[in-house]
């Protein structure tokens, strides 16, 4: 591990003052510490923001605001979230261990790096670690890699469960940039596809700081589900995950949300399937057709064709779980 300077910020203004391109923020530390140990991250300094940012969860008539330092455990125990946005708790509980959830911050969860084995193996080429070095997974062991939205530069997937629920619920990411100017990024636009810049995971302005997440009020708290398929039943990253939520009027689907993890470099929304579901009567036939729409345009790699029927089945199961809630 490379030696570094450690600084603790009292507030966001001080945090931004300390931050440079050569320094990293640390909140819960559940990802950055791993990157430091593996010599993937080699900053000159670490800026602790754990006491600089809010951990409050506030419900208003129009939305809920989640402070950047709200621990993942708080997302599973807060009464307002459990009543009005239960999909968040469902997703968070599907990920990590209780110990990690006790430490991990909401903002940090958004910023975690991929768990692609080649990214963590510094002896192999990886465009996310070293620009232009190549993607070892493209023609290598890509069993856990992407099936949609990837490029020849990178086939890694985003590891978060929380983010799948946030993209499904149309959240917004709020923050302050290096000049202390506030900004807002729709969650669907926060994370990037690899394209030809796979080392960039998101559209966060350089040296900026996430302050909170805002989720608009919705009617998806009655009918929702989160399905996560993995190699073991706990503490494992998703091969495929699906967040589903329906707003119903009787048996008719008024509005729908479908999002997946384990399929792309970013949390993925299935907009065409959502559009198909709107106005339909909830039924096994309709759910099967929606799952078929989801897999129409996916393109598996050499080792992950199994993900296609797995994804289709997970979508169908998630929709059935919603109406059976």
Image (cartoon, helix red, strand yellow):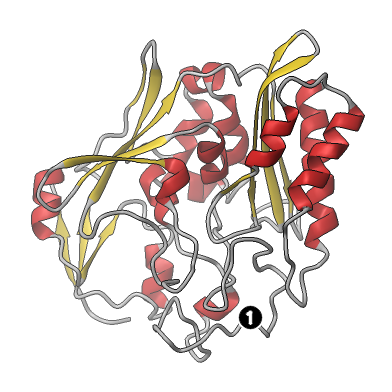
Farthest residue, direction top: 250
Q: Is residue 226 visible?
A: no
- Would you say 229 lies left or right of 113 here? right
Provide residue 272's location: percent of width, then percent of height.
68, 40
Q: Which residue position holds label 1?
A: 138
Question: Is 140 or 57 nearer to us in this picture?
Answer: 140
Q: Nearer the viewer, residue 24 or 220?
A: 220
The residue located at (69%, 68%) in the rendering is: 144
- Number of disc labels: 1
Q: Residue 92 location in percent, x, y? A: 56, 40
Q: Is residue 200 visible?
A: yes
**Which residue sits furthest right?**
285
Secondary element at tag 1: loop
Residue 310 left/right relative to 208: right
Please tell me which residue is depicted at 31% across the width and 54% down the height of the picture: 204
Where 181 falls versus 47 (above or below)?
A: above
Q: Is residue 28 above or below residue 217?
A: below
Disc 1: CA contacts within 10 A as few (<14), some (14-19) or many (>=20)? many
Kindly indicate the quadrant of the structure image that contains residue 129: bottom left
Q: Measured from the top left, where is residue 286 in percent x and y?
A: 85, 30
- Residue lying at 69% horizontally and 48% vertically, measured from the top left: 241
Instruction: Specify the quadrant that holds the C terminus.
Output: top right
In the rendered structure, the answer to whether residue 258 lies left or right of residue 131 reads: right
Task: From the viewer's perspective, tell me whether residue 138 is left or right of residue 232.
Answer: left
Q: Nearest the camera: 186 or 4?
A: 186
């Amino acid at each position: 591990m490379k030696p570094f300077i450690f600084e603790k910020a009292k507030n966001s203004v001080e945090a931004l003052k300390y931050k440079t391109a050569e320094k990293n923020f640390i909140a819960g530390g559940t990802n950055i510490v791993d990157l430091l140990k593996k010599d993937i991250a080699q900053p000159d300094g670490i800026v602790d923001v754990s006491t600089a940012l809010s951990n409050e969860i506030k419900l208003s008539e129009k939305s809920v605001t989640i402070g950047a330092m709200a621990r993942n455990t708080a997302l599973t125990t807060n009464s307002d979230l459990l009543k009005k946005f239960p999909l968040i708790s469902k997703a968070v509980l599907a990920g990590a261990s209780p110990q990690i959830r006790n430490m991990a911050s909401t903002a940090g969860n958004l910023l975690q790096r991929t768990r692609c084995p080649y990214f963590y193996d510094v002896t192999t080429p990886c465009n996310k670690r070293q620009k232009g070095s190549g993607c070892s997974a493209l023609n290598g062991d890509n069993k856990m890699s992407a099936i949609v939205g990837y490029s020849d530069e990178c086939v890694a997937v985003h590891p978060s469960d929380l983010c799948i629920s946030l993209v499904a619920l149309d959240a917004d990411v709020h923050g302050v940039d290096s000049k202390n100017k506030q900004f807002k990024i729709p969650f669907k636009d926060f994370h990037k596809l690899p394209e030809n810049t796979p080392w960039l995971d998101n559209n966060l302005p350089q040296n900026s700081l996430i302050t909170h997440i805002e989720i608009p009020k919705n009617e998806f708290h009655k009918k929702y589900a989160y399905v996560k398929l993995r190699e073991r039943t706990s503490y494992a990253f998703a091969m495929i995950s699906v967040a589903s939520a329906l707003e119903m009027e009787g048996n008719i689907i008024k509005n729908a949300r479908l999002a997946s993890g384990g399929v792309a470099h970013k949390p993925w929304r299935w907009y065409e399937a959502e559009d198909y579901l709107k106005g339909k009567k909830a039924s096994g036939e309709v759910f099967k057709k929606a799952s078929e729409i989801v897999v129409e345009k996916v393109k598996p790699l050499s080792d992950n064709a199994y993900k296609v029927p797995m994804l289709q089945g997970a979508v169908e199961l998630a929709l059935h779980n919603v109406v059976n809630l």
